[in-house]
């Protein structure tokens, strides 16, 4: 994965053990100087790190646009499939921190969507801000299995619209509101 690195000023403390990529740092790590240690020649050099991925990968957690101020969702990439007809990637994501009206739930709101199949267009249209890395959410697997069976039968697809539009579609379907009504 290609990364953009922002270096800090010289005069940093001595380097820590070598860490490659975006692995989780140990719990006792001084978070005020989060960084990676790389080897340059035979010398260790400390490079404080702030990375922004250039492409999408499993385990990435993103903040994304919601429909209103009360809804500030996150999007976690759980799995990536290649479309069998060459249509690009299908990302299987979990959306959290939602506020979707759902009359069948206590409190009347759904706060997460465990599985949503989306395309590159969804990710590009959703004003993503990289948060960090997280393990995939295993709860997506049930929805994925149902989607995969329907997809293989030719009766399911994936979203190519922004996350606010996906959330609006889900809410309207749950509340029997036609998509063409305001």
Image (cartoon, rainbow, N blue to C red):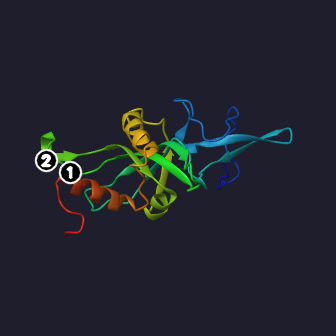
At x 19% / y 69%, what residue is drawn? 181
Looking at the image, residue 20 sits to the left or right of residue 76; the answer is: right
Q: Is residue 26 above or below residue 160?
A: above
Q: Residues within 10 Å of mark 2 (few under 14, many from 20)?
A: few
Residue 120 placement (x, y as % from top left): 51, 58
Q: Residues within 10 Å of mark 1 (few under 14, many from 20)?
A: some
Name the foreground residue: 109 vs 32.
109
What residue sits right under mark 2 in the picture?
Answer: 103
| Element marked by disc 1 | helix
Q: CA distance from mark 2 to mark 1?
A: 8 Å
Q: Is residue 149 above or below residue 162?
A: above
N-terminal of the two: label 2 or label 1?
Answer: 2
Residue 177 placement (x, y as % from top left): 17, 60
**Which label was assigned to residue 174?**
1
- Residue farthest to the front, as pictured: 153
Quadrant of residue 151 within the rendered picture? top left
Quadrant (top left/top right/bottom left/bottom right) for the C terminus? bottom left
| Element marked by disc 2 | loop
**Which label was assigned to residue 49?**
none
Looking at the image, residue 19 sits to the left or right of residue 32; the answer is: right
Report if the CB atoms under discs 2 and 1 are less than 8 Å apart.
yes
Q: Is residue 120 above or below residue 114?
A: below
Name the foreground residue: 114 vs 160.
160
Residue 156 placement (x, y as % from top left): 39, 49
Residue 86 placement (x, y as % from top left): 59, 54
At x 54% / y 45%, what residue is drawn? 81
Quadrant of residue 71 within the rendered picture? bottom left
Name the foreground residue: 60 vs 41.
60
Name the front one of labels 2 and 1.
1
């Amino acid at each position: 994965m290609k990364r953009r690195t922002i270096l800090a000023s010289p005069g940093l403390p001595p380097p820590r053990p070598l860490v490659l990529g975006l692995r989780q740092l140990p719990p006792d790590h001084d978070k005020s100087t989060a960084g990676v240690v790389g080897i340059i020649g035979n010398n260790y050099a400390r490079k404080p790190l702030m990375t922004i991925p250039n492409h999408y990968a499993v385990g990435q957690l993103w903040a994304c646009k919601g429909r209103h101020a009360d809804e500030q969702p996150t999007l976690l990439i759980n799995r990536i499939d290649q479309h069998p007809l060459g249509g690009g990637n299908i990302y299987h994501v979990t959306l959290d921190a939602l506020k979707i009206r759902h009359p069948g739930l206590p409190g009347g709101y759904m706060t997460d969507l465990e599985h949503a199949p989306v395309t590159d267009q969804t990710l590009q249209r959703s004003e993503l801000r990289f948060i960090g890395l997280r393990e995939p959410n295993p709860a997506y697997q049930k929805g994925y299995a149902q989607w995969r069976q329907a997809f293989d039968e030719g009766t399911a697809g994936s979203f190519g619209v922004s996350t606010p539009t996906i959330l609006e579609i889900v809410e309207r379907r749950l509340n029997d509101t036609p998509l063409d009504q305001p």
